[in-house]
Image (cartoon, rainbow, N blue to C red):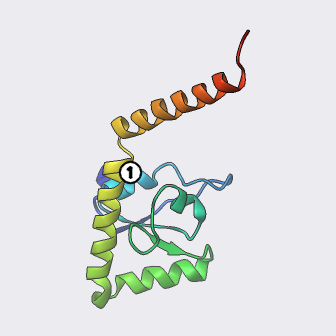
Amino acid sequence: MVEKFNEYKMCLVGEEILGVPGIGYVEGMACGCAYIGLDSPMYRNLGLIPGVHYISYDGTKEGLRQVIEYYQQKEHQEELEHVAKAGCEYVRQNFNGSVVAERLIFNLIVEQRKWLNNNKFV
């Protein structure tokens, strides 16, 4: 998969039917591809900013065609490279195993403390 992503400047990994990002989008971004995804709060909730970390579109075939054509134009190559670089740096810093595990443990401890405070045993 990595070898294939490395052959391209942009990648599109369709979102899951449940409304979450497709499984390969982080891998594509980590390989340096500019990711094309829906303009959706699910990405902003992960800290991704449309136009900065990824290329957003409206979910239509026409919208997808328009953003691909825009970024394929020679005069927009620098903009495409900036998005790809910012996205790559963001996912490598925030979605690596160590960071994700640390956040998970922290959140589990917070939730445990909340639960223990609400369920005091006599």
How far from the left and from the top, in percent, is residue 6?
A: 28, 58
How far from the left and from the top, in percent, is residue 114?
A: 63, 30
Q: Residue furthest front?
A: 122
Q: Residue furthest bottom?
A: 75
Categorize mark 1 by other alpha carbons within 10 Å: few (<14), some (14-19), many (20+). Answer: some
Left or right: 122 in relation to 46: right
Q: Given the image, on which type of amino acid does mark 1 rest?
A: Glu
**How many discs appear?**
1
* Front one among 46 and 23: 46
Q: Mark 1 = which residue?
A: 27
Query: Compared to 57, does 4 lie above or below?
Result: above
* Front one among 70 and 8: 70
How far from the left and from the top, in percent, is residue 54?
A: 42, 68
The quarter of the picture where residue 14 lies is: bottom right
| Residue drawn 59% across the image and 31% down it | 111
In what quadrant of the picture does the C terminus appear? top right
Using the rendered image of the protein, determine whether residue 64 is visible from the camera's viewpoint: yes
Look at the numbered disc 1 and give the secondary structure of its residue. helix
How far from the left and from the top, in percent, is residue 74?
A: 28, 88
Query: Compared to 86, does 74 lie above or below?
Result: below
| Residue drawn 55% across the image and 55% down it | 21
The quarter of the picture where residue 84 lies is: bottom left
Using the rendered image of the protein, determine whether residue 1 is visible from the camera's viewpoint: no
| Residue drawn 36% across the image and 37% down it | 97
Q: Residue furthest top?
A: 122
